[in-house]
Amino acid sequence: MSFDRSIKIAPSILSADFADFGREIQAIEAQGADWVHVDVMDGHFVPNLTFGPPAVKAFRPHVKTFMDVHLMIAPVDPYIEAYAEAGADLISAHVEAGPHIHRTLQAIRAQGVKSGVVLNPGTPAEAIEHVLDLCDLVLVMTVNPGFGGQKFIQSGVEKTRRIRRMIGDRPIHIQIDGGVTPETAPLVVEAGADCLVAGSAVFKGGSVGKPEIYGENIRALRAAAEGARQAA
């Protein structure tokens, strides 16, 4: 992945049809998705349970773009190798998931994949200031992690702005996850985000039988985000 700050739309397959992941992934990519976002939950760190390494390995042959694996699990370090071997292009881990985020990011990079650090809504931007040089991506949660379809938390906009200042000219993406819609996307893009995770906003109304709806939803998000960038 060469670095650029163009707007990237990363549909979360947590909102896809669980019985048809392969065709769902192919459909969103064909309709313009830049990345495929995989939300991994353990029923402990967050109140839901989703994809283990075998599932991610099964997704991998279908992903032709970039597979972004967000680990909402604790502990996280014992599972990094398994998710890397399953085919993740980027693995992101939460500051809140353990006592040694610096060590966690080192472990991700040691697997030869991109590394991301994640902040829950109640965690200040300053928590990642001293690990930015180990990051390829900062993920700002704009909902409390664990479920799709939640309402956007407004304080994430100012947090994004502060993180963008902290990053400076370093080649680090800022990703937003939670309540992203054509209405909220401009707020975070204006603040400095370049990668937007969207679940229901992409998958709502569509299916593998009606993939053009996915395309319409992706284009609406991209137009709103790029419009905000041009206006800034």
Image (cartoon, grey):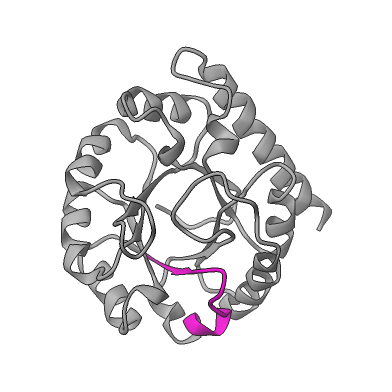
Question: Of all residues shown, which one is farthest toward the top?
Answer: 209
- Inspect this view and state whether residue 1 appears: yes
Number of disc labels:
0
Residue 173: percent from the left, percent from the top? Answer: 52, 62
**Quadrant position of the C terminus in the picture:** bottom right
Q: Residue at x 58, y 49 (%)?
A: 150
Q: Nearer the viewer, residue 121 or 113?
A: 121
Q: Is residue 109 above or below residue 179?
A: below
In the image, 211: left or right of 91? Answer: right
Q: Nearer the viewer, residue 226 or 160?
A: 160
Is 122 one of the magenta-colored residues? Answer: yes
Residue depicted at 39% across the width and 27% down the height: 17
Residue at x 23% of width, y 73% of height: 107
Determine if residue 68 is in view.
no
Please state the horizontal and vertical placement of residue 203, each as a whole percent of the image: 53, 30
Residue placed most toward the observer, 47 or 57? 47
Q: Position of residue 202 (x, y in %)?
A: 56, 34
- Residue 178 part of the magenta segment: no
Residue drawn where x is 25% and y is 71% of the image: 75
Place of residue 21 in the rendered image (x, y in percent of width and height, measured from the top left): 33, 29
Q: Which quadrant holds residue 158?
A: bottom right
Q: Which residues are magenta?
A: 116-128
